Image (cartoon, grey):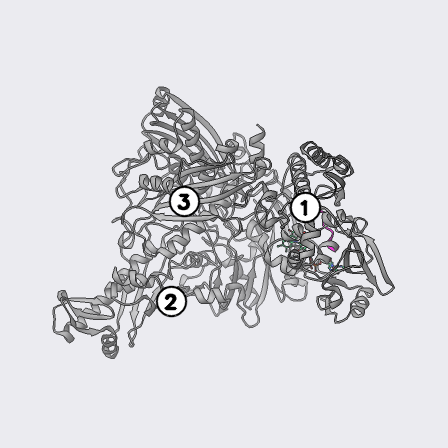
Amino acid sequence: MAVVEDTREQFIRQDGKDKVTGLGRYTADLARTGMLQARFRYSDHAHARVLRIDTSAAKALPGVFAVLTQDDVPDVRYGGFVEDRTLFAKDVVRFEGEVVAAVAALTQEIADRAVELIEVEYEPLPAIADPEQALAPGAPLIHEGWAGYGGNEDVVREGNDCSHSSIRKGDVDAALASADEVVKERYVADMSHAVPIEPRAIVAEWQGDKVTVWTSTQVPFIARSGVATTLQMPEADVRVVVPHLGGGFGGKCEFHFEAHVAALARAARRPVRLVFTRREEFVAPDHRREGQVLELETGVMKDGTIVARRARLVLDNGAYAADAPFFPQLAAMMAVGPYRVPHVSVDAHLAYTNTTPSGSVRAPTAPQSCWGLELHMDAVAERIGLDPVEFRRRNIVHPGDETATKQVLETIAAAESLERAVEMIGYGRELPPDEAIGVACGWWPTFALPSGAHVKLHGDGSGTIVTGAQECGTGSVMALPLLAAEVLGMRPQQFTVVYQDTDAGPWDAGASGSQTTTNNGRAVVEAAIDVRNQLLELAEEVLEAARADLELVDGRVRVKGSPSTGVDITELAEKAAGDKLLLGRGSGSPPASPDCDISGCTGRLGSESFLAPTFMTHAVRCKVDRATGVVRVLEVAAAHDSGRVLNPVGANGQVEGGVAMGIGMALSEGSQLSDDGRQLNPYLLDYKLQTAADVPEIRVEWVGEPDPTAGPNGAKAVAEPPCVPTPGAVGNAIAKVAGRVRCLPMTPMRVWEAMQR
Amino acid sequence: MSATYTAAATLPEALAALASGARPVAGGTDLVVGARQGKAPLPDSLVAIHGLAELRGIAETGGGGLRIGALVSHADLVAHPAVRERYTALADASAIVGSHATRHVGTLGGNVMNASPAMETGGPLICFGAEAVLVSESGERRVAVADLLTGPGRTAARPDELLVAIELPAAAGGSCYARLEYRRQMEIAVVGATCAVTLEGARIGSARVAITALTPRIVRVPDAESALAGGDGGAGAVQAAGDAAAAAAQPISDVRASADYRRAMAAVIARRAVTAAIARARGSSDSVPIPASPALHGADRD
Ligand SMILES: Cc1cc2nc3c(=O)[nH]c(=O)nc-3n(C[C@H](O)[C@H](O)[C@H](O)COP(=O)(O)OP(=O)(O)OC[C@H]3O[C@@H](n4cnc5c(N)ncnc54)[C@H](O)[C@@H]3O)c2cc1C
């Protein structure tokens, strides 16, 4: 560990200087010779049958090089879980941002005019914005042909219910009947968004049969598969390059518009660039955070022991499945929370609606579900007259406890995170009457996925990590040199990282699911070990010592116990350059999911057990302006168990950012919808993010032990967990001053309305 | 595209451009940002006025008032001692426009001529009895700001007229502009209120109250003013002024708030503006504009 500890302070991420000084190039900054500009024509209705599309006037406009509709691309339905999607609308449009046609033209102005010249004739169909209405008997089907769609066989679906999951444990009815108290409540969370500061951009250019796509994606290899699948070409002919990415937060996961731009570029025989406006970034991509309706019922004994939880969750899917079908199972786990609950019955449904499709956004489902559950927990505590922290203390999971799916939890520090957070904030201290402290606990899994990396040493002893992992701003790719350096006894500054290019690095799932350090970190460590073995082999000859007696420290291979006998790695590298490549490869096998028992449960989609689960407690102090309902968060204490923390600067930054995002979800971030599913505030003046001036002091502490089942050296997930408990903690603070606000976001008007009741 | 853009070097050059149909652009934070958002396309012909020295600067007038050039930025307004001390409500208003960047670039002239019913400086200017100095090739005329703002995005100025300055008559007493704020920066007024009062001994002499973003154009509220004038400025009067402000509001329901909430907040925010104006008139040291002023926000700025 020594090397890492020593260099941590001065380690500056490779992309930092570019980004801070403005030298960094993002996709929209790129220009290719002869490049055209693209614009999409979106559906004019949230739900309608397309009767006729006439592109002749658009094609005739001078300066227009290509106009495409579904007739111009292969007739392919795609989708990771449910194949319910085509590149362009086919017969029916199902949300306001559905792409009907695309134009490439000499200038943006011409492209804008051309899309208006496309004539589309529609037969409007009834649109459903409300997910509960979509599941009601007799609701019109959003996908009439749903039964014929291909996809993942494990998704349990029926009509507008795009995915159903349940958890059953014990006998809920009997347990509720025997409980001292039963508390039943309903919570509703509005849809929200990832809002990366960079609206997405894509540039595509062909050479012969091969296409290069520069794109602001979090998941280059998945984007590559998407292009290959929908345009029916080999993956080897598709190269995806990701310039600097201006944030993603999940919104840029999955395959989106790379194929549209590639198809335009092929038709136009010119490079084509698409740059989204902010409005498009809200309306068109299938990756917003889903709204939820949570009906929660808890049976509790007078001493504070929870005996049963029944819940029904309805998640709003939007018009297409995207990656959302695994949400119901995850949300069901979240509705139980990091607590011991012996009898459980949870049903979660993902309802198609005529709105922008939802998809993974930082800790998908969790902040909303956790918000509902944690407010409910306080309501239950209130019913039995117990302090809410004491109530949590009596039910929170400890090592050896069993989850709702009968996974036995091992290396966890949930209780420590609770104790530490309340201690940090000074829970119980005297406060002015308009201030209160709210507390919420959450949990989140670590995801195991395949991943790969190469590590090579050059003749001068410097190194390069070649990885398929994607950097989305979190710094996890930028921190990979820490791991390689540790294995090789070198300094992280000696390594550069080659990433951003599917033609260079091995396959990786991308910047999603907090998985980079866990999985690509494992790969980098293995590749570095491969190089270390090669170095040791060389050193054995030079030093005439057995490998077992050698160690790599401070840039040298030296004989253990005799530090003066050694050889510099640079010298070995120079020696190797003559006849050997110092090239390591690694992937490492992804750890297996922990055992669990889900007999009687529906919809097994990978979240039935949590690998190396993380736990976090947030305690926040809020002030409520009683006259206006305006809430200010004054102080946040965050205590997280993420196993071993590899890079504290980066990890603390993730918590600070996650908390800021969580405060936004708590207080101001939500889309309002018209009755027919159109977003009424798809712009930053009225979709209110928190500003730097709103974000309070955030104190972060790490609890827990390295988890041997997790990533390198026992590191668990870091990036997603921080936004999970914040909205619940803020909501519990508000409730103490103003009463419980059962809608998310808890806007000033909603807080004020709660006080009028 | 036949769009033209020129940067005027002199006032006559700018006026000639306006006479031939060009629109002026100062900081561009309304005009350009609005065009990008699709509110209205950029005009075909633009004349930039940022180089006109005549439109800059804040100067004392003979009558004890201030003449503020149209190009004075919100940041400069907030920093100006005479504005802070004598026209505090205007400093309050400029202090909360957008963010640091917006205040650095956005001008008073642009704020006024954009004529948004949610615009921050309008209420204070109307309560102070400010006049707009408009110049065209055919000469200069003065229009009270209250008459200049005729409706959402509309002014009484002719297209060939340039706003060169705002003149404020002498002011005594205290004033305040307060706004409902969902967050601490980058807000738009959903409810705003201005109050300016003078004292006669311990009693309130004259009072002016205006409401912002609650009517199609910023208006004074005579009932609120008469509830205060001549009175003791106590809780009852403040309450009555707030109620009058709520009664004068014509609130709408939209994504920002319901009409009910807006009306209730009209009373709350008006009460806060009135309370702070009276306190300032009585010499409260709380004469600093809003970002540093806890009292106006229900003391929430810890
Ligand atoms: C992020 C952001 C936040 C904002 N927040 C606020 C806020 O909190 N409160 C608020 O009130 N406003 C806000 N605004 C709006 C804007 O910044 C202000 O109204 C600013 O004062 C406009 O000044 P400008 O110089 O940029 O105007 P410009 O955009 O240059 O001009 C605005 C209009 O006035 C006309 N015009 C400008 N100068 C003259 C002149 N001398 N004579 C005649 N016509 C003229 C222009 O032709 C145009 O029609 C915000 C804007 C942004 C982008």
Chain of the residue on which disc 2 is drawn: A
Nearer to the camera, B158 or B209: B209
Q: Which residue bears the numbered disc 1? A: B176
Residue extending farthest bottom: A578
Q: At which x and y percent is residue A665?
A: 50, 43
Q: Which residue bears the numbered disc 3? A: A637
* Main secondary structure type of the part rendered in magenta: loop
Gap between marks 3 and 1 measured at Cα? 36 Å
Whether A562 is among the magenta residues is no
Residues at discs 3 and 1 in contact (Cβ within 8 Å): no
Mark closer to the chain start, 2 or 3: 2
The amino acid pointed to by label 3 is: Ala
Answer whether residue A147 is visible to the viewer in this image.
no
Q: Residues within 10 Å of mark 3 (few under 14, many from 20)?
A: many
Q: At which x and y percent is residue A279?
A: 59, 52
Chain of the residue on which disc 3 is drawn: A
Q: Which residue bears the numbered disc 2? A: A498
Image quarter for ligand 1: bottom right
Compared with B3, A371 (above or below) is above
Direction from residue A210 to residue A114 in the image, left or right: right
Location of residue B25 (image quadrant): bottom right
In magenta, the rendered stretch is: B113-118
Direction from residue A410 to residue A360 in the image, left or right: right
Whether B115 is among the magenta residues is yes
Answer whether residue B15 is visible to the viewer in this image.
yes
Q: At which x and y percent is residue A388?
A: 40, 32
| SS assignment at label 2 | strand
